[in-house]
Amino acid sequence: MVSKVKGPIKVAGNSYYMPATSNAGLFKGYVIDPGSVGYDDLCRDDVHSVLITHGHNDHFRHAHEFREKGARVIASKDDALLVRNPEVNVRGLFSWARPPAEMITPYFQGDACEVDLYVEDWLDSSIKSVWLPGHTLGEYGFITEDAVLYSGDSLYSKEIWSKYKLPYSIDPELCRESLIKIKGLDFDYVVPGHGDPMERDDALKAADYHLEQLDRVDEIILGLIEEPVSTESLVTRFSYKLDLYKSLNNYWLTLVMLKGHLSSLNHKGKVAYRLENYCMYWYKV
Ligand SMILES: [Zn+2]
C-alpha cells in the first residue's frame, strides 16, 4: 500500500494527493478535484490549473478559490454545465422541479465556478484525460506520467462499498463500459475520489467488484418485479432488501439509480413497464 503521512502524500513521482472526504490530487501545477480541500488547506501559490473529474459539488466546491487566485478551471463540456450552475444537478434529481430545500443532497450543494477550458480542448503531454462516464455523463479520469490515475467517482474502493451499498450512477451501461476501460488502462496506482489510493492489482479487483455489484443490482431488481411493482414500491422494497440507510438523501439517490437500472434492463428486453391507473408499474419479461 501507499504509505500515509500528514499533508500532501506522495503516490509516485510528482503525483500526490491530500486525503479528505473528497480526495484532492496534486500534480505539478495542477490540483484535481478541490471538493473538500480548499486554497487555504493547500497553501500553495503555484497552482495554475484546476482539473475537475465531474460536476458534483463535493468534487469542485473550492475550485472558485483557486480561480480567484489566478488558476484556470478545466472541466468536460458535459459537466461544465453542472460546475457553472450546480442548480442543474439539484433540479435533475427532482425531475426538473424545484425540490424542498431539505431534500437537496449535500453532494450537489455549493458554489458555482466558471469553467475556463474544456477537458476536450486541453492538452498536456505529462497528464492525460480519459472519458469515464456513467456516474455523470462527462466524467473524466486523469493519468499522470507517473502512471497515477485520478479516477474521480468512476471507481469505488472496497471501503466505500462497505459505507455506501449503492454508489450513485445515472447509467449502469456507461458505468460498465468505463470500468472495463479502466481495467485496460496503463497505470500503477489509482487515487479514487473517496477512500485510500490503490495499487494496480487492488484497483483491478475493485473494478471487478464494482462490475459484480452492478450485475447484483440488476438481479435484485429482477427478483423484486416477478409481479408488476410500482416505481415507488420498488424503491421501498429494494431499500429494505439492501438495508439502505434511511434518509431523504438516500431515497432520491436510490430512485435515480433504480431508474437507470430499470431503463438499462428495458433496453435489454428483460424488463417491461405499463402505466395503469396513473401509476407506473415495472415487471420482469
Ligand atoms: Zn460524484
Image (spheres, rainbow, N blue to C red):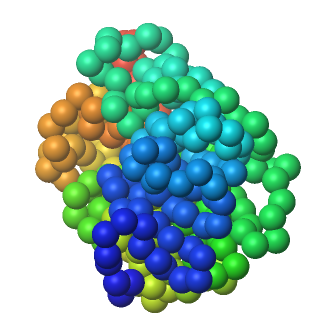
Query: Left or right: where does residue 16 sit relative to residue 284?
Result: right
Query: Left or right: where does residue 135 sit relative to residue 226?
Result: right
Q: Position of residue 35 (x, y in %)?
A: 45, 45
Total numbered labels placed on residues in the image? 0
Residue at 85 percent across and 49 percent down: it is 121
Residue at 35 percent across and 24 percent down: it is 104
Of the pair 264 and 252, the residue shown nearer to us: 252
Q: Position of residue 1 (x, y in %)?
A: 36, 87
Of the pair 211 and 51, the residue shown nearer to us: 51
Q: Is residue 173 above or below residue 170?
A: below
Residue at 36 percent across and 65 percent down: it is 7
| Residue 3 visible, this orientation | yes
Q: Is residue 36 above or below residue 191?
A: above
Q: Position of residue 155 (x, y in %)?
A: 47, 65
Q: Position of residue 179 (x, y in %)?
A: 55, 68
Of the pair 278 and 190, the residue shown nearer to us: 190
Residue at 50 percent across and 86 percent down: it is 200
| Residue 35 visible, this orientation | no
Query: Left or right: where does residue 19 sit relative to residue 155?
Result: left
Q: Is residue 258 above or below residue 101?
A: below
Quarter-of-image position of residue 99: top left
